Image (cartoon, rainbow, N blue to C red):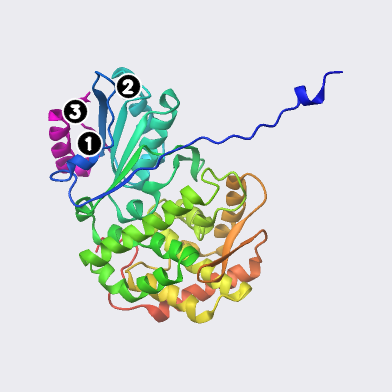
Amino acid sequence: MSDPSETSLDIQFSVPFVHRLRVTDDVSREDLPQLLSVIEAGDGERAKVLLIAERSLAEPTSRIAEQLGQANGIDLVHAPVLVDGGEDVKNSSKTVELILQDINQLNLDRRSYIVAIGGGAMLDAVGYAAAVAHRGVRLIRLPTTTLAQADSGVGVKNAINQFEKKNWIGTFAVPWAVINDAKLLCTLPDRDFRCGFSEAVKVSLLKSEAEFSWLCENSDAIREREAVATKRAVHQSCLLHLKHITHGGDPFEMLEARPLDFGHWSAHRLEPLTGYQIRHGEAVAIGVAIDTIYSSLKFGFPEQDMRAVCKCLTRLGIPLWHEELTPTERLMQGLEEFRQHLGGRLTITMLRGVGDPIDVHEIDHATMRNAIEQLQTIQQELAVSHEPKVGSEG
């Protein structure tokens, strides 16, 4: 018989990554050097760069393309490739296949760069294509929504939807670099601008009582797009997400717990229930509110803090109700979908207090239905003149 020490080997190892974040005011003009600084050319070679952007961002994209085309050490291999944005870009593999064809036809390799300019859904689709081509083409993300700059832009997940389920096809891949540019947010309609801050509220509830208090105090200014408050809220949310990814010990979600998915089990179910008419940030706001109420009913999360969460989200201009929340049993199917997505035992993050999360493996369905019913009552009580309806562009 062979020596067991030679036939059964478990060798633990780690792979180093570098996460590059840059914050700029106008990367299409005076801050372009920040973009150039994260593009590395080989010895005696020029770096191949493919620029991909949402159609609505053609103007700033053309300015970036013009400057990249003139930069030393850069080979802009093609005119900017324009694709659709929004959740539709993730609802089929069409865009991914087109990008893969471009990567092949333009002879990009693993040391080439894709610079992607767009919102979270578009970055997900482009990121997935970049991650699977050659097992990884370098991806530089320029998020153009508050949600993507505050959260998913610095994430390590890329995916498209399948079987009417969010992010069913995807991969983990660390972006080569992320550039959060303030000027790019100016293109957003009010509805999309406001709903992105649901992720800022979410991560503050998990990580920082001080940041949650600050968001509550400055929610009116953020809703009205006051520049200083907006920039701070986006950046602090981004840093809290980035710290969890790089120092939380589980960037590729190999363990059961996914604290950054607080409120997402219902959000991911609500989006397809509405035919993706609801924005991801709006669904997250509703999901965060539901799980905060449930945490209050089940785990002693203080009621005054629960109401502060709902009030903060409302004052940010995010609606907290959608007719597809009822009948509740359709929404509750999201728990099983979330369990499958986790790959085993159901693990949902809830709250005992602000900055005090708890992982649970069972959900009391009666109490959860009660939480949803309470949300309907609370949002009616909080309704104010500036609260938008889902579907309003602001």
Circle 3 SS class: loop
Whole-number angstrom distance, CA of label 1 to CA of label 2: 18 Å
Residue type (three-letter) at the residue carrying disc 2: Leu
Q: Is residue 159 left or right of residue 190?
A: right
Query: Which residue is under mark 3?
Result: 79
Asked if labels 2 and 1 touch by Cβ distance under 8 angstroms, the answer is no
User: What segment carries the magenta color?
Assistant: 54-83
Asked if labels 3 and 1 touch by Cβ distance under 8 angstroms, the answer is no
Can you give x and y, in whole percent of width and height, for residue 188 in the image? 23, 55
Q: Is residue 184 left or right of residue 97?
A: left
Q: Residues within 10 Å of mark 3 (few under 14, many from 20)?
A: few
Residue type (three-letter) at the residue carrying disc 1: Leu
Query: Which residue is under mark 2?
Result: 108
Q: Residues within 10 Å of mark 1 (few under 14, many from 20)?
A: some
Query: Which residue is under mark 1?
Result: 36
Position of the N terminus, as image quadrant, is top right
Q: Does the magenta run of residues contain 64?
A: yes
Whole-number angstrom distance, CA of label 2 to CA of label 3: 14 Å
Counting residues from the start of the chain, the first of labels 1 and 3 encountered is 1
Counting residues from the start of the chain, the first of labels 2 and 3 encountered is 3
Q: Nearer the viewer, residue 304 or 9?
A: 9
Height in image: 132 above or below 315?
above
Height in image: 327 above or below 216?
above
- Which is more foreground, mark 1 or mark 3? 1
Q: Residues within 10 Å of mark 2 (few under 14, many from 20)?
A: many
Q: Nearer the viewer, residue 238 or 288?
A: 238
Q: Quadrant of residue 322?
A: bottom left
Residue type (three-letter) at the residue carrying disc 3: Ala
- Which is more foreground, mark 2 or mark 3? 2
Counting residues from the start of the chain, the first of labels 1 and 2 encountered is 1
